[in-house]
Image (cartoon, rainbow, N blue to C red):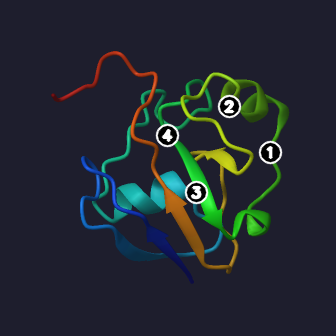
Amino acid sequence: MAIIKILPHPEYCPQGTEITASAGTSICEALLENHIAIEHACDMSCACTTCHVVVREGFASLNALDEAEEDLLDRAWGLEPNSRLACQAILAQTNLVVEIPKYSINHAKENH
């Protein structure tokens, strides 16, 4: 099990929190399973950038980026060298610190 520390985000996790997740789980799945409703407009199919996160610690422990994810990340708001799409970043046993950017390029949110 890995511990994911989520830094405070005004909408999704105002106080910040720590969750646990099994290796082989995506960051997006782990967040959703722990009631952190991160956007994932493409239903985790690597077709958008709404689940963009910045991995502040533990980046090297994640699976390698593939070409599709790299291409999409170029369109993400607030892109940083340690950015990942949460739906594509698969956990190992290493603990992470994750920041959800303040904005995404999603122009319409469902259920709002």
Question: Which numbered tag is attached to residue 65?
Answer: 1
Q: Residue at x 63, y 36 (%)?
A: 79
Which residue position is annotated with label 2?
73
First in sequence: mark 3 vs mark 4:
3
Q: Residue at x 54, y 48 (%)?
A: 53
Find the distance from the CA under tag 3 to the CA under tag 2. Answer: 16 Å
First in sequence: mark 3 vs mark 2:
3
Tag 1 secondary structure: loop
Question: Which numbered tag is attached to residue 51?
Answer: 4
Find the distance from the CA under tag 1 to the CA under tag 2. Answer: 10 Å
User: Do the residues bearing badges 3 and 4 touch, measured as CB atoms within 8 Å?
Assistant: no
Q: Residue furthest bottom?
A: 1
In this rendering, does residue 86 appear at all?
Answer: no
Which residue position is annotated with label 3?
26
Instruction: Name the residue type under label 1.
Output: Leu
Instruction: Name the residue type under label 3.
Output: Ser
Residue 94 rendering spot, x and y as whole percentages = 67, 79
In this picture, residue 96 sits left or right of residue 32: right
Q: Quadrant of the C terminus?
A: top left
First in sequence: mark 3 vs mark 1:
3
In this picture, residue 78 sits left or right of residue 105: right
